[in-house]
């Protein structure tokens, strides 16, 4: 339908159509390449290929700015050769563009920690952050919690960075405040398509929301419980559900579930699911998932080692906290292992720069050398990676 609007030159209707930005970009691809590549998934491959290459470029910059170029190359190699992710980026899904936009937003947030900006560059970077937030919202408006959570972590690390320097970089501070305002404006002004659906679920859960809405913690618990209930209703009979009998009725339920959410977010699907066949995935497919999960466990262990070695770097903590909190949040909300596996890509990718750093540090130690600290921001100050911004 979107492609047909473009074909007849009705750009106004195309803009007003309440569809995600990624779907509209796909319609442009079909309009440009559909006649050559066919009215099939190949018609969308130019856009998917762009997202894939751009993700690799952003991952390299994230890792290089936080750790070293060697760690960046390792992180890029892991993302590029990640079998299920590579296959995932060839499908007609919003995920590749959403992951790219979120990684760009994290990279912009990271720049406030690594660079002393001029007034012009600070305003330019703030505008880029606001524009990226708007594209994220228009691509997947139900990911507002991930976007706002990333912003909160970025603000906290920015303040820690300023305190550690014992000085206030006015240009960075004003630019950061402006970016925050632009992100909040995007959340307030852009249309929220997800509110047009799920009215029955919200109505059914309204008594629980009112019960837990007495305090700030209660409101957060109600938000988590509502999202979990939506996933339970979306996957009622799936063969790979995790704790599908668990629902949150009080704030205490949410607090007590925290250790289990960490376990699910970081480690699921668990080994007992690697050899059994599912309703949609064969036994061989689950075996491949098991191989990937073993590699994921190794990457997570190396990431924790890299975090410890570079624990004085605010940029390292920025990547780790966004990834860790995101996966814990998924452990609370996403009850289906298959959906969790797909949605978690973003947060695992943010861990891979730390995995690369951990691999470099461990190699140096095993070779008899001393683990180095390639990004001691507390000693070097802000002038680190961006001479064109100085």
Image (tube, helix red, strand yellow):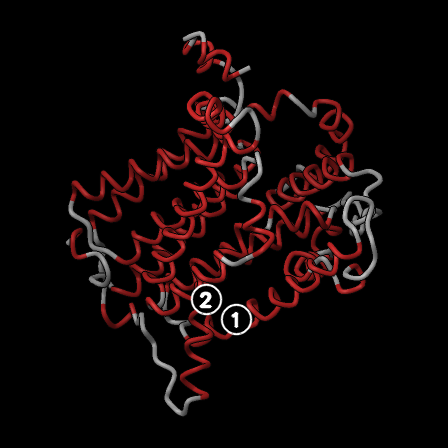
Q: Is residue 166 above or below residue 28?
A: below
Q: Position of residue 353 (x, y in %)?
A: 44, 63
Give the class, few, some or many, for how many residues have Cα within 10 Å of label 1's Cα (few <14, many ≥20). some
Badge 2 marks a residue whose secondary structure is: helix
Say how many tags the image has. Answer: 2
Instruction: Please tell me which residue lies in front, 277 or 12.
Output: 277
Q: Is residue 206 left or right of residue 41?
A: right
The residue indicated by pointer 2 is: 354
Q: Position of residue 53 (x, y in %)?
A: 41, 47
Name the residue rendered at 44%, 26% in the picture: 33
- Give the CA distance from mark 2 to mark 1: 7 Å
Are the residues at dot 2 and dot 1 in contact (C-beta closer than 8 Å)?
Answer: yes
Residue 102 falls in which quadrant of the image? Answer: top left
Q: Is residue 373 above or below residue 52?
A: below
Badge 1 marks a residue whose secondary structure is: helix
Q: Position of residue 105 (x, y in %)?
A: 39, 44
The mark that comes first in sequence, 2 or 1, is: 1
Residue 299 falls in which quadrant of the image? Answer: bottom right
Q: Is residue 336 above or below residue 136?
A: below
Name the residue rendered at 70%, 39% in the picture: 212
Give the label on residue 387, or none.
none
The quadrant the N terminus occupies is top right
Q: Is residue 328 above or below residue 372?
A: above
Name the residue rendered at 65%, 51% in the picture: 341
Q: Is residue 282 left or right of residue 93?
A: right
Residue 119 falls in which quadrant of the image? Answer: top left
Instruction: Please tell me which residue lies in front, 321 or 338.
Output: 338
Give the class, few, some or many, for how many residues have Cα within 10 Å of label 2's Cα (few <14, many ≥20). many
The residue indicated by pointer 1 is: 304
The residue positioned farthest toward the front in the image shown: 36
């Amino acid at each position: 339908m979107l492609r047909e609007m473009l074909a007849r030159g009705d750009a106004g209707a195309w803009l007003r159509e309440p569809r995600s930005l990624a779907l509209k970009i796909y319609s442009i691809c079909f309009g440009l390449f559909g006649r050559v590549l066919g009215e099939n998934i190949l018609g969308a491959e130019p856009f998917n290929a762009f997202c894939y290459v751009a993700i690799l470029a952003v991952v390299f910059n994230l890792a290089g700015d936080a750790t070293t170029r060697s760690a960046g190359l390792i992180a890029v190699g892991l993302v590029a050769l990640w079998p299920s992710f590579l296959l995932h980026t060839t499908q007609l899904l919003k995920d590749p563009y959403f992951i790219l936009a979120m990684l760009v937003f994290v990279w912009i947030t990271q720049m406030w920690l690594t660079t002393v900006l001029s007034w012009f560059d600070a305003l330019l970077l703030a505008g880029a952050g606001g524009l990226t937030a708007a594209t994220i919202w228009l691509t997947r408006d139900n990911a507002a919690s991930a976007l706002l959570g990333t912003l909160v972590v970025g603000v906290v690390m920015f303040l820690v960075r300023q305190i550690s320097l014992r000085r206030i970089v006015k240009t960075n501070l004003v630019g950061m405040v402006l970016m925050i305002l632009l992100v909040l404006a995007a959340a307030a002004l852009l249309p929220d398509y997800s509110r047009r659906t799920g009215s029955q679920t919200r109505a059914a859960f309204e008594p629980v929301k009112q019960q837990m809405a007495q305090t700030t913690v209660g409101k957060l618990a109600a938000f988590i419980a509502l999202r979990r209930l939506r996933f339970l209703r979306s996957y009622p009979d799936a063969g790979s559900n995790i704790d599908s009998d668990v629902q949150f009725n009080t704030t205490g339920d949410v607090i007590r579930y925290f250790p289990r959410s960490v376990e699910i977010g970081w480690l699921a699907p668990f080994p007992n699911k690697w050899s059994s066949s599912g309703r949609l995935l064969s036994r061989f497919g689950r075996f491949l998932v098991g191989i990937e999960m073993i590699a994921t466990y190794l990457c997570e262990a190396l990431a924790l080692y890299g975090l410890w070695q570079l624990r004085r770097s605010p940029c390292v903590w920025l990547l780790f906290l966004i990834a860790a909190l995101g996966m814990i949040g998924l452990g609370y909300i996403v009850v289906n292992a298959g959906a969790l596996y797909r949605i978690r890509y973003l947060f695992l990718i943010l861990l891979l720069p730390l995995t690369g750093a951990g691999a470099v540090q461990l190699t140096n130690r095993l070779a008899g050398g001393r683990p180095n600290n390639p990004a001691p921001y507390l000693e070097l100050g802000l002038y680190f990676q961006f001479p064109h911004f100085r």
